[in-house]
């Protein structure tokens, strides 16, 4: 599974889930902007960073998603963090969150960084230890779906789809969550087409409802505007091109065709296809 791209999309579209995951109020998401940051003059890229919009009292959150064994994860993570702090000189304090599918992958030596963990400045989260899905908030339960085996994932996904209808009253947010669940299922069942998955979980019928279609259109318009803002503000400079390419996955998730995205972002079709394949 391409877990990095799934988590990036999840935290970008539904940032409240991150704050629930670390035990904070989901409303905090309204005061943060989420992005992936490349540290200049190095090969380092931080998986995700929640940057406070205004309040200097709120900490910056650095997020690392680790789904494979890496004995250098902590040396790399703290190098990235302190390079970021040196280059940006933020006035805010910072926190780190490392997300593992299971504790068995957390094998890196923390001897030189133990104070970060004992002080809880850095938190480690093991998805398979979050508890029973039925007792978890729907956002956190959706994250846990990523690490469930296929048999359990089938049952869990159906429960989450039902819960989304009962617990989420804002239709665009409900649609975002359903699209995320569908994306996770596509990765978990690689031999099935998206259409087969939609039929298997009743998503095809749900997508035909008037409310869903209206929310989709609303989301498409918002996605196009965000893509244009992200991609065009910096013109055709290198940074602007990167921003345009970064917007491709979001617009694809909202249902735009490759041709529509190319037109909206002033890219050629081949650039859009390459960006889509790189996610």
Image: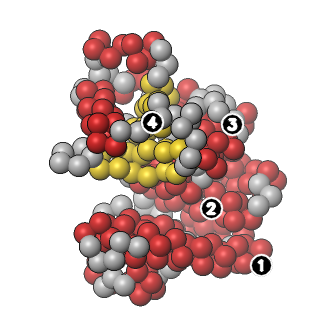
Label 2 – label 1 distance at C-alpha: 16 Å
Q: Pointer 1 and pointer 4: residues touching (CB < 8 Å)?
A: no
Residue 240: x, y in percent?
Answer: 33, 70
Query: Where does the image place residue 149, in percent across and percent down from the top left?
Result: 51, 41
Q: In which quarter of the image is the C terminus?
A: bottom left
Whichever of labels 2 and 4 marks the residue nearer the N terminus, that label is 4
Q: CA–CA distance between discs 2 and 4? A: 33 Å
Per the model, the C-alpha gap separating discs 3 and 4 is: 23 Å
The numbered disc on residue 210 is 1
Q: What residue is shown with label 3?
A: 25
Neighbor class of circle 3 (other Cα within 10 Å; few <14, some 14-19, many 20+) is: few
Q: Nearer the viewer, residue 82 or 56?
A: 56
Q: Are marks 2 and 3 in contact (CB under 8 Å)?
A: no
Label 3 vs label 1: CA separation?
32 Å
Count of marks overlaid on the render: 4
Residue 264 drawn above or below residue 19: below
Secondary structure category for the residue under label 3: loop
Q: Which of marks 2 and 1 is in front?
A: 2
Q: Which residue is drawn at 28% across and 81% down?
A: 270
The tag earlier along the polypeptide, 2 or 1, is: 2
- Left or right of 269? Residue 12 is right
Residue plotted at (59% across, 73% down): 222
Reading the image, the residue beneath label 4 is 91
Residue for point 32% across, 21% down:
107
Q: Which mark is residue 176?
A: 2
Q: What element carries label 2?
A: helix
Q: Residues within 10 Å of mark 4 (few under 14, many from 20)?
A: few
Answer yes or no: is residue 21 visible.
Answer: yes
Q: Which residue is pictured at 30% across the width and 32% down the height?
A: 82
């Amino acid at each position: 599974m391409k877990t990095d791209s799934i988590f990036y999309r999840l935290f970008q579209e539904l940032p409240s889930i991150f704050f629930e995951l670390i035990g904070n109020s989901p409303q905090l998401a309204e005061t943060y902007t989420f992005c992936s940051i490349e540290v200049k003059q190095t090969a380092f890229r931080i998986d995700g960073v929640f940057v406070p919009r205004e309040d200097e009292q709120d900490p910056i959150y650095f997020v690392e998603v680790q789904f494979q064994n890496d004995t250098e994860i902590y040396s790399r993570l703290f190098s990235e963090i302190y390079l970021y702090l040196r280059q940006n000189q933020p006035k805010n304090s910072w926190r780190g969150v490392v997300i593992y599918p299971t504790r068995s992958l957390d094998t890196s030596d923390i001897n030189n960084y133990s104070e970060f963990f004992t002080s809880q400045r850095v938190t480690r989260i093991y998805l398979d230890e979050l508890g029973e899905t039925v007792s978890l908030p729907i956002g956190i339960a959706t994250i846990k779906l990523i690490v469930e085996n296929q048999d359990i994932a089938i049952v869990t996904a159906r429960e989450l789809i039902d819960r989304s209808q009962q617990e989420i009253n804002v239709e665009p947010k409900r649609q975002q969550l359903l699209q995320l669940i569908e994306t996770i299922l596509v990765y978990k069942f690689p031999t099935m087409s998206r259409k087969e998955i939609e039929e298997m979980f009743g998503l095809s019928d749900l997508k035909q409802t008037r409310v869903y279609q209206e929310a989709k259109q609303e989301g498409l318009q918002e996605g196009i505007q965000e893509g244009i803002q992200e991609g065009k503000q910096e013109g055709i400079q290198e940074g602007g091109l990167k921003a345009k390419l970064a917007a491709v996955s979001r617009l694809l998730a909202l249902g735009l065709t490759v041709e529509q995205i190319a037109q909206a972002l002033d890219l050629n079709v081949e650039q859009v296809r390459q960006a889509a394949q790189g996610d």
